[in-house]
């Protein structure tokens, strides 16, 4: 069996896949990565038996394009922030930290990975809350996942 799954699911799926293989005797070839990039691979001809994404838009697109039959929600994601363990980053509250122009934020690539999409939503909310701050943070953000989608997103933005 071939599985394409979002990278955020790796820790949860790894023990499940071991148990499945032991109980069923079937081997699972798992590929973890940004859900949008995995979806693109399916659109370009790869055919996993299972595609797991915490973002419903990617599997819904595959159904709309007739690459899949149905979407079954099974989990959700939440955006979280992590910082290096240094006083300059751990002492201020997150909003203050995000608005400080000396710091950049690393994100996943929008359109390629749901976390990147969630980061863009955060920037939009910050912009509504504190005009100018969301767009300033967006300009300091660094997408850490590349590929064709990053180039398309940069050209569109």
Image (spheres, grey):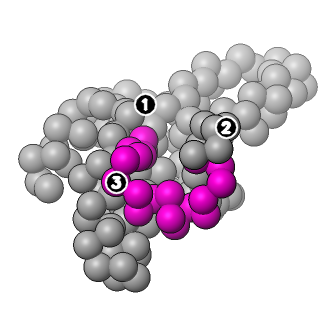
Q: Residue 85, which numbered label?
A: 2
State left or right for residue 99 relative to residue 20. left
**Which SS class for mark 3?**
loop
| Image-quadrant location for residue 25 | top right
Mark 3 or mark 1: whose residue is earlier in sequence: 1
Reply above or below: 131 against 107.
Answer: below
Q: Which residue is mark 1?
A: 47
Q: Residue 101, which numbered label?
A: 3
| Image-quadrant location for residue 145 | top left
Q: Are marks 1 and 2 in contact (CB under 8 Å)?
A: no
Q: Residue at x 24, y 53 (%)?
A: 139
Q: Residue at x 29, y 49 (%)?
A: 140
Q: How far separated are the C-alphas under marks 1 and 2?
A: 42 Å
Residue 84 in percent (x, y) is at 60, 37
Q: Residue at x 54, y 25 (%)?
A: 31
Residue 67 in percent (x, y) is at 37, 46
- In this picture, which residue range is highlighted in magenta? 89-114
In the rendered view of the protein, which quadrant contains the C terminus? bottom left
Q: Residue at x 26, y 65 (%)?
A: 135
Reply above or below: 5 against 66.
Answer: above
Is residue 109 covered in magenta? yes
Viewer-side label of 3, 1? 3
State left or right for residue 72 relative to residue 126. right
Please say whether residue 62 is visible from this viewpoint: no
Residue 118 in percent (x, y) is at 45, 60
State left or right for residue 147 relative to residue 15. left
């Amino acid at each position: 069996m071939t599985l394409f799954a979002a990278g955020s699911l790796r820790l949860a799926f790894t023990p499940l896949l071991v148990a499945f293989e032991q109980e069923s005797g079937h081997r699972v070839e798992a590929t973890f990565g940004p859900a949008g990039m995995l979806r693109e691979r399916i659109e370009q001809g790869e055919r996993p038996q299972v595609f797991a994404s915490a973002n419903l838009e990617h599997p819904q697109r595959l159904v709309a394009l007739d690459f899949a039959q149905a979407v079954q929600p099974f989990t959700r994601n939440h955006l979280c922030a992590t910082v290096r363990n240094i006083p300059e980053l751990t002492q201020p509250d997150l909003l203050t930290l995000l608005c400080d122009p000396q710091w950049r934020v690393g994100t996943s690539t929008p359109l390629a990975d749901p976390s990147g999409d969630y980061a863009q939503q955060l920037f939009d909310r910050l912009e509504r809350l504190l005009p100018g701050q969301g767009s300033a943070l967006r300009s300091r953000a660094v997408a850490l996942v590349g590929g064709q989608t990053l180039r398309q997103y940069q050209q569109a933005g």
